[in-house]
Image (spheres, rainbow, N blue to C red):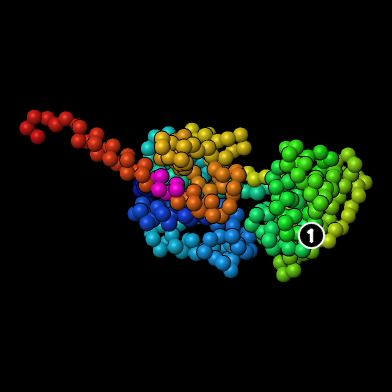
Amino acid sequence: MAGDVHDLVVAGSGVAGLSAAVYGARSDLDPLVLEGDEPGGQLTLTTDVENYLGFPDGVGGMELIQRGKEQAEQFGAQFRHGSIESADLDGQPLALSLSTGETVRTRALVVATGASARWVGADGEDELMGYGLSTCATCDGAFHRGDDVLVVGGGDSAMEEALFLAKFADSVTVVHRRDELRASEIMAERARDHEDVAFAWNTELVAIDGSREEGVTGATLVSHPDGYPREKYEAGEDVDVEAVDVGGVFYAIGHEPNTAFLRDTPVALDGDGYVQTAPDGDAWATTETAVSGVFAAGDVMDPDYQQAVTAAGTGSMAALDAEEWLASTDATAAGAAELVPTEAGD
């Protein structure tokens, strides 16, 4: 009902959100999970997950998400379509305005809205994401043993991806639109010194070939000595066009945390838009944000690891932190009520 105030709302239905939902439901918080615009999050773009504990033979990303949702529902979590467009986090209860036009009110909120990988905009990427095209070398690198692969990007993340992929692939080519890397000198030097890592300077990816049955089979690159060749290519200017045979493509041009709805709230965000959390008291880590009753979990607060298992871990932490916070506020309210003076004769 419109006037209901939930104990716990979880924003996001990826691994972090589902983990928070399971823990919240088992604590009798009756969590409401807002599934977001892309239910299931980034993991639904991964065909096989081999590094999630408990699945020695691997598990499909979509299957893992579906199992998590069923588990949360089994314990009493409720799911609703829609995402948060704006939030009033000043005072209690917290008010969340949804894309469906509804307003949801809650005492505690777990933000698990994730981070979306930036895509290049190359032809074929929509069809092939998760089928040889990936945004996570740690997740998918082992599937490319013996392949020639491309890494698109020029920062530290791209260097890390290239070096990791070099453990499995026959060759790794870093595709960068300029002739100078943005990466730190130490990371750039490691990549340049690796015998299996090459660089395609002043080059950009414009198309990926393959199918969901065969995976990635090739790619089309454009280059120009002045850099930024895609702009010139699309403007009809003269550029070099090259078709290459590759078995995998990895995007490493960063992520965008899904925190637009928090920008005008007291929740602290870092320069890239990730939710900031900080240790509290004696705890070595916490999911608490700058707003009382608001917690964060998963990739939305983690620009470093961004793994399914770490997302699940912080999701459970957020639910436990929310449960403790709710219990403490209830105890405070009960204590305050006991101190209210009564009139003589009552």
Q: Is residue 338 magenta?
A: no
Q: Is residue 212 left or right of residue 109?
A: right
Query: Which residue type does callout 1 highlight?
Result: Asp
Against 65, residue 205 (above or below) is: above
State the image coordinates of residue 126 (x, y, percent, origin top left): 70, 58
Residue at screen point 40% across, 63% down = 74
Q: Secondary structure at mark 1?
A: loop
161 or 229, nearer to the observer: 161
Count of labels in the image: 1
Against 95, residue 47 (above or below) is: below
Residue at screen point 79% across, 60% down = 170
Residue 337 visible in rendering? yes
State the image coordinates of residue 66 (x, y, percent, origin top left): 52, 63
Q: Main secondary structure of the magenta part?
A: helix
Q: Quadrant of the C terminus?
A: top left
52 or 48, nearer to the observer: 52
State the image coordinates of residue 167 (x, y, percent, origin top left): 72, 56
Label 1 Cα neighbours within 10 Å, binned few <14 / some 14-19 / many ≥20: some
Against 114, residue 290 (above or below) is: above
Residue at screen point 90% across, 42% down = 225
Range of residues picked out in magenta:
317-322
172 or 88, nearer to the observer: 172
Residue extending farthest left: 345
321 or 42, nearer to the observer: 321
Q: Is residue 59 left or right of residue 4?
A: right
Residue that numbered label 1 is attached to: 170
Residue 234 visible in rendering? no
State the image coordinates of residue 80 (x, y, percent, origin top left): 47, 55
Examine the image and state in which quarter residue 46 appears.
Answer: bottom right
Against 79, residue 270 (above or below) is: above
Residue extending farthest right: 238
Residue at screen point 70% across, 52% down = 164
